């Protein structure tokens, strides 16, 4: 990591930009969670253990929500 006053390399600048983008995301956002937890047994178990306060939870399967694209159709007469 560059010291204060140093010019950041392109890689360090990209890394800093990535960190700034990540700060804007929350793990509980639907899109982010869907991607992160798809087929992620350990991640789902960890979240459920924390939320429910139960250590013995074992996941048998993981199924994330399917994106629902709603189209508003207006019939003009």
Image: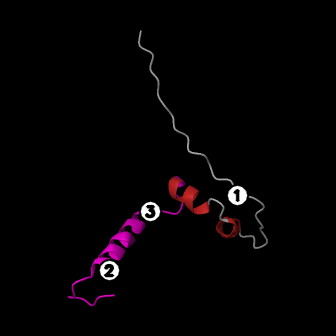
Q: Of the residues under marks 1 and 2, which one precedes in the sequence? A: 2
Mark in front: 1 vs 3:
1
Mark in front: 1 vs 2:
2
Mark in front: 2 vs 3:
2
For the point 51% across and 58% down, the residue is 32
Q: Of the residues under marks 2 and 3, which one precedes in the sequence? A: 2
Residue 15 painted magenta: yes
CB atoms at circles 2 and 3 under 8 Å apart?
Answer: no
Q: Nearer the viewer, residue 37 or 28?
A: 37
Above or below 1: residue 52: above
Q: Which residues are magenta?
A: 1-30
Residue 12's disc number: 2
The residue beneath circle 3 is 25
Which element is circle 2 on? Answer: helix
Which element is circle 1 on? Answer: loop
CA gap between label 1 and label 2 equals 36 Å
Which element is circle 3 on? Answer: loop
Residue 62's disc number: 1
Query: Mark 3: few, some, or many residues within 10 Å (few <14, many ≥20)?
Result: few
For the point 32% across and 80% down, the residue is 12
x, y percentage for residue 54? 75, 70
CA gap between label 1 and label 3 equals 22 Å
Residue 41 falls in image quadrant: bottom right
Residue 27 painted magenta: yes
x, y percentage for residue 61? 75, 58
Q: Of the residues under marks 1 and 3, which one precedes in the sequence? A: 3
For the point 64% across and 53% down, the residue is 64
Q: Is residue 18 left or right of residue 32?
A: left
x, y percentage for residue 39? 66, 61
């Amino acid at each position: 990591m560059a010291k204060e006053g140093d010019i950041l390399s392109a890689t360090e600048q990209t890394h800093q930009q990535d960190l700034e983008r990540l700060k804007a995301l929350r793990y509980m956002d639907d899109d982010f969670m869907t991607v992160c937890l798809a087929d992620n047994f350990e991640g789902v178990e960890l979240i459920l253990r924390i939320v429910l306060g139960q250590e013995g939870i074992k996941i048998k399967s993981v199924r994330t929500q399917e994106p629902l694209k709603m189209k508003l159709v207006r019939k003009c007469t």
